[in-house]
Image: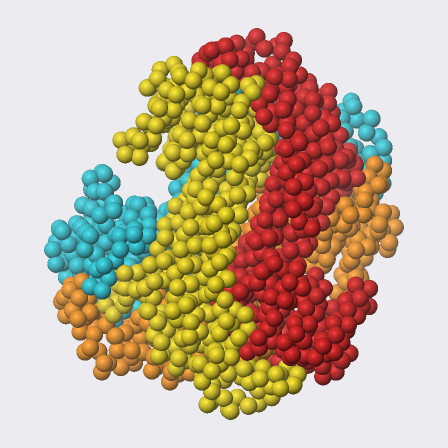
Chain colours: A red, B yellow, C cyan, D orange
Amino acid sequence: MTDYIWKKASSQAVDERVMRFLAGDDVVLDRELLVYDIQASQAHARGLARIGVLTSEQANKMVESMNRLRAAFEAGDFLLDGRFEDGHSAIEAWLTDELGEIGGRIHAGRSRNDQVAVALRLYMKERLRTLASQCGVIAEVCLVRAEAEADHVIPGHTHLQQAMPSSLGLWWAGHAEAFVDNAALAWRIRDWLDASPLGTASGFGVNFPLDRDGVAEELGFPRLVVNPQYAQNSRGKTELRALDALAAATGDLRRLSWDLSLFASQEFGYLEVPAAFCTGSSIMPNKLNPDTVELLRSLHATIVGARGELEAVLSLPSGYQRDLQDTKPPLIRAFSRGLAGLALVPALLDGVQWNRQRLRKAVSPGMHATDLANEQVQQGRSFREAYRAAAAQLDSLAERRPEDSLEARVSPGGARNLLLDRLKARLQGLGKDRR
Amino acid sequence: MTDYIWKKASSQAVDERVMRFLAGDDVVLDRELLVYDIQASQAHARGLARIGVLTSEQANKMVESMNRLRAAFEAGDFLLDGRFEDGHSAIEAWLTDELGEIGGRIHAGRSRNDQVAVALRLYMKERLRTLASQCGVIAEVCLVRAEAEADHVIPGHTHLQQAMPSSLGLWWAGHAEAFVDNAALAWRIRDWLDASPLGTASGFGVNFPLDRDGVAEELGFPRLVVNPQYAQNSRGKTELRALDALAAATGDLRRLSWDLSLFASQEFGYLEVPAAFCTGSSIMPNKLNPDTVELLRSLHATIVGARGELEAVLSLPSGYQRDLQDTKPPLIRAFSRGLAGLALVPALLDGVQWNRQRLRKAVSPGMHATDLANEQVQQGRSFREAYRAAAAQLDSLAERRPEDSLEARVSPGGARNLLLDRLKARLQGLGKDRR
Amino acid sequence: MTDYIWKKASSQAVDERVMRFLAGDDVVLDRELLVYDIQASQAHARGLARIGVLTSEQANKMVESMNRLRAAFEAGDFLLDGRFEDGHSAIEAWLTDELGEIGGRIHAGRSRNDQVAVALRLYMKERLRTLASQCGVIAEVCLVRAEAEADHVIPGHTHLQQAMPSSLGLWWAGHAEAFVDNAALAWRIRDWLDASPLGTASGFGVNFPLDRDGVAEELGFPRLVVNPQYAQNSRGKTELRALDALAAATGDLRRLSWDLSLFASQEFGYLEVPAAFCTGSSIMPNKLNPDTVELLRSLHATIVGARGELEAVLSLPSGYQRDLQDTKPPLIRAFSRGLAGLALVPALLDGVQWNRQRLRKAVSPGMHATDLANEQVQQGRSFREAYRAAAAQLDSLAERRPEDSLEARVSPGGARNLLLDRLKARLQGLGKDRR
Amino acid sequence: MTDYIWKKASSQAVDERVMRFLAGDDVVLDRELLVYDIQASQAHARGLARIGVLTSEQANKMVESMNRLRAAFEAGDFLLDGRFEDGHSAIEAWLTDELGEIGGRIHAGRSRNDQVAVALRLYMKERLRTLASQCGVIAEVCLVRAEAEADHVIPGHTHLQQAMPSSLGLWWAGHAEAFVDNAALAWRIRDWLDASPLGTASGFGVNFPLDRDGVAEELGFPRLVVNPQYAQNSRGKTELRALDALAAATGDLRRLSWDLSLFASQEFGYLEVPAAFCTGSSIMPNKLNPDTVELLRSLHATIVGARGELEAVLSLPSGYQRDLQDTKPPLIRAFSRGLAGLALVPALLDGVQWNRQRLRKAVSPGMHATDLANEQVQQGRSFREAYRAAAAQLDSLAERRPEDSLEARVSPGGARNLLLDRLKARLQGLGKDRR
């Protein structure tokens, strides 16, 4: 495969360093894309048969050959490595090896440009579905714990200052709703980009009446990226939106990790991170550090960086430019690391142990002042007046029990009215309206 | 209004510079939010009346007083400026001025935290609807011109190198589809964030049975942000998603502006930017520069910067932190400048004049090579073989007419099969399934 | 001034909205640049006189007229507002008003392009000097407190977990060194960009033998930006480096603010933020929140956003493009807000009050384990062996006093050997080798 | 090496996926750092001997053993891979294997925290020196070509519009000065971060009188990072500044690549990119695309992304947090790819072939208008008047020769006065004042 089929005589002298720079990690990244490239190539072959560019027999042979390639790749018998320029070349090389001249026909009516575009769309659809599913599982763990620990008192904070009594139920439900929202967003973005660019070739269409609709349907796309120029111009843009959905989840994970990290400090002492998620220190024998929590906090930075990298590629005029090859590494890096991190969260959350006594003791009398003000409002005072009155009576609050405060917190979503059923119903709705 | 109602004795000495730093441009930014804040405050007042915290009469007085405030503000008779800490204080001050003690009751059962959250959601919903609408108009202009100029030849480029004959129709339709996608995304994000945080107070709920559902319905929200903690934790996150939708549009505008900028150079000489969008040089008497096109290209940078600013605020634990005040400036700056720029695009595109002769003459014989290869494929050769054969026969292409090439480009989306109806139908569908 | 001097007949119809979009906030931003523009224009006039393009008398009249403009501007008698396209036009308009035809001669041998470039360089030099000075003052406050509180015990953290006994001296000295480094960086960047672009006109030079060296010297630049193309191509690049220096300082301020924010929580309870830097809550009568600390933490986000905005403008070919106008707003916004924030830090740090008893009590016995291991190392054990041994003897540490631990921390930079003199000397050195 | 020396009993159950997530690509990245880690470990061993914690013999054995490790690593006989947690563990494991119990003594008086900090500083110093050197070579190629092609006419552009006649000399010299500036910046940043953090342990110092100054001197550091807390807090900050310097170079490379990309289009037709830097198309037989130029343009995006990733990690309180591990991947990725790209530039520039005839013919009469205006200024007209007059006489310019225009462009830095010697002298000065 060192004889690249479209290499020109004039570029024979291409220096080794240039080739390495041009290739980058492309072939390694394409390991993540190969199965989607095969899937699309098979649909393309069948489509070519439907319009008579291939015979049915030729198409079938190709499809079967690619089935064998997929099996070999998944079994580890076929290694996608530096022998190939990229995954696209590897498929064609395999077909030519197995089928001879027929193999070369797979590229009729398409270009690497739409080939990579369709593989990336299939990849993103799959990863966004996984993302939605992972967010759903995280939300479920939070909902289970919210229900189980609905009544346990914790000090609620704003400005990192103790504010009002709150409950573990409210804390868990808050994180649950975040991940319900994230799952909803992942589905929305997935549906938005669910369109097939295959059959747009290098950005100008071809002089065959390709059956683009049929091919798209076979691949599970409900519609086409209609325009060939937009099939190229949407590269990077689509990837950015997929990363937006991922970033919503890792951003909320950062917030959750901040809570865990603070609460696990000796000064807060509110919880213990499960030991399986901790490691020791190389110099301090007394330490057991919540390293996983910290790396889940910094995980978002990987996505932020990937977004920024993609974004910075895209200041370009219309049509394919080689710059667009550089959209692959950040996309794949972000989803690989991002989903690996999110996958750890359910077990982590499941294992968190609260120091309930400490949580309850941390609630100080002053935290009842807002309740006091609100009670006076219910007795007819204006809030501003009640506020000032309460500020003057902070001493009177020493006898109040935080449990009573929670008991009265009846506004929808509040500690006594968490509306967990609504969150559950919304989450289930997301799953239900699709396969 | 210099006597901030929640200022403590202990902070009396607050130094002027600190106050200025704390305030930032908040009160100026709140000019964009005031009408939403009023709208939400009116719904809140009615909601308080429904649960008996206010009498109907009190609520009505408040609603009417706020109607007057809104009218005065829109007429320019009420100026939101440095006399007020922010828009929220201004409303309360107005109410207290007009209604006396009753005015102070408006803050019962809410906090500035959920007040700003709901105003921001209403603001984003409105701006995203405007964005969707602007994208739709841009798409329409492109579709009209695509239809009118469907057959005109242009050289198609990849790698900024001449590649294959293409058409003005394909070029316009490509930009049209981009903005159809952008309108679709704006609607999706708008719907995703269409939930009411009002009634969550400072992040813990309150000890009133607030009618959150009724208030939400009155404000046009189909659902609640259920959880009070998430109402705070979603600040910034929601704004980022709104900016994502805006960035999709300005990013495509950047690509379109690149095309216009290149095509307007003397070297390309493909088009003329309407003079109304150009200015002269301060030193070179011969110049007429397409400045508007360049600033529409750099417009995206404003959104990128705003996203980055917002993103960098959000590494925080749960609950309201004052850092979140800094999410307002980038959001409002981005939408103000972004929508102002997008609003210029329809007239600009409408006025673009193509140099058709030059476009046609720019198509060189070599650009027909792909057609030649594809024709041989249809006669039974493998694409790879046909490719090599065509590369050897570039000289034979001198007689070919680009119009014939376009005529044969029948693949769906190609020059002879632009499928403009599908794009139109999709665009109209976006408008139709909502008010 | 609505008759822009380089407006062409063909653009007479320029639509109001286009003009507004083109202008942006340019004229408001130019308020920050006007004095530098005047200063450079005066040097330019004198330079023109030296090569005979102006007479000495003409140049003197111009210089004096601009002195009056500067005085009027600084007194508030001359307002730079929407009557002018930008500050450059305003100067020329003033000169023409005062001097008639002579005023129009100021633009000989220059363009708005090098005019804005030189004004921006002067602006950045001044702001970087202020930055260096502010960082120096912050470092000094830290050094004073480090010396005064050198011996006070605090629990040292890694991973937000208690690690080893440490001292207030070490904490303060750590922040001091950060700001010494930041001052050093600000000077380095200032010197790096200390070169005059004036006299490069629109990027191609002019057909006068301008005395660029003389003009540069008069303006305090030790060297030229030699090449006219680079004078344009370095726009944005130079600004980014100035923001890098600012970001180093605000980034460290974020870290410092995080410490203060955590330490001020009830759970840590290590310090109190001075009341002048706090505000109350709109709903919770018991709260006093360290809002200033939080906004100093999020201040860095403003710089990050500005950097990203500038960065996103710069994907351009050589020469001036109008896109570059969009480098001004982020630069000026970042320095205005950034320096305003940094200016509050000395008083804030000066006012921080430690709860020394609580700090000392927070040191738990296990924090002495590293000392124990290190002692065994000094008695000949391998560190790894000693580490395991210490981990097994955590119980034995209950009797240890943290003061003894600090007393033994003799490694250079450690609690007993803070080397404050080195930090002071480095800071003074920065100041000394320049005016 | 699966028995991590600081693993606790309680974390025995650490799940495989957690370990993989914690490890990330750390051990692979450490291949870039291992030689620096060895170098610093050797100096640390000698330093321990000087204060009696090791005997001279022990230290010598360690140093020799690490010499063997370095040789084995460089010969490919020692592979740093998943058997090790990271490079630091690998060194200790090697020492223990070779020297038994003595090997374990290397960790006395240090922590992984300062070990990685010092390795990173050494790595950055080396990479910044390479960067400076590469920028110098690029500048030299540009200077050679500027001299050789000083008189060749090209159309000068602003706003991508033809503006004034310019010269290849001016174009090359402009890019030369950019890279002189970049080399200067790389040296400045290198010197700024040239300080040793070794001997600060985990951020609190140790109870040994470490000879930090001696160790620093041996490693070539002119000064210490004095404070142990700042040794940790400067992680990420220092890396960002190193990336700033790299980004200055790749940013200018982007601009240069834009020029090449535009000039290589058929529409401009100004130059040919050497074939060795081009590749063909998979579908279009007529294409030869300047792919390398495009990937050198998008190279900057890699650095932008890495900066953003690093930046997003750093919102943290003082002291080491595990999040900081995530600063390594972006730093190393950026320098690896960035320097590989920059290394291609000299040969690329050397091989660029100009189409001189086409360049000259592209200069149109109107481009002489500024000259005309300036000539009238020299005859006593005001510039504004001359400007209007020239605008009215554009027809009179048809006879002018661009060579004459260049001949008169005598302002310093202009086409007739490029001041290449100043640029050369500055470049040589950078090299000279250091080893």
Percent from the top left, x then y, of residue D431? 51, 65
Specify the quadrant of the image occupied by residue D292: bottom right
Specify the quadrant of the image occupied by residue D71: bottom right
Query: Closer to the camera, B113 or B208?
Result: B208
Query: Closer to the camera, B385 or D412?
Result: B385
Relative to D170, is C99 on the left or the right?
left
Establish if C91 lies above or below B222. Answer: below
- Residue farthest to the left, as pictured: C100
Tally of marks: 0
- Residue at coordinates 61% horizontally, 83% vertically from top-left? B378
Relative to C343, is B224 on the left or the right?
right
Percent from the top left, x then y, of residue D113? 69, 44
Percent from the top left, x then y, of residue D388? 17, 66
Percent from the top left, x then y, of residue B63? 38, 24
Establish if B415 lies above or below D205. Answer: below
- Please indicate, yes or no, whether residue B154 appears anywhere in the rendered image: yes
- Residue at coordinates 66% horizontally, 24% vertically from top-left? A167
Query: Closer to the camera, B206 or A299?
Result: B206
Establish if D283 lies above or below C332. Answer: below
Establish if D402 lies above or below A317. Answer: below
Q: Quadrant of the C terminus of chain B?
A: top left
Query: Closer to the camera, C260 or B129?
Result: B129
Specify the quadrant of the image occupied by residue A273: top right
- Residue at coordinates 55% horizontally, 63% vertically from top-left? A225
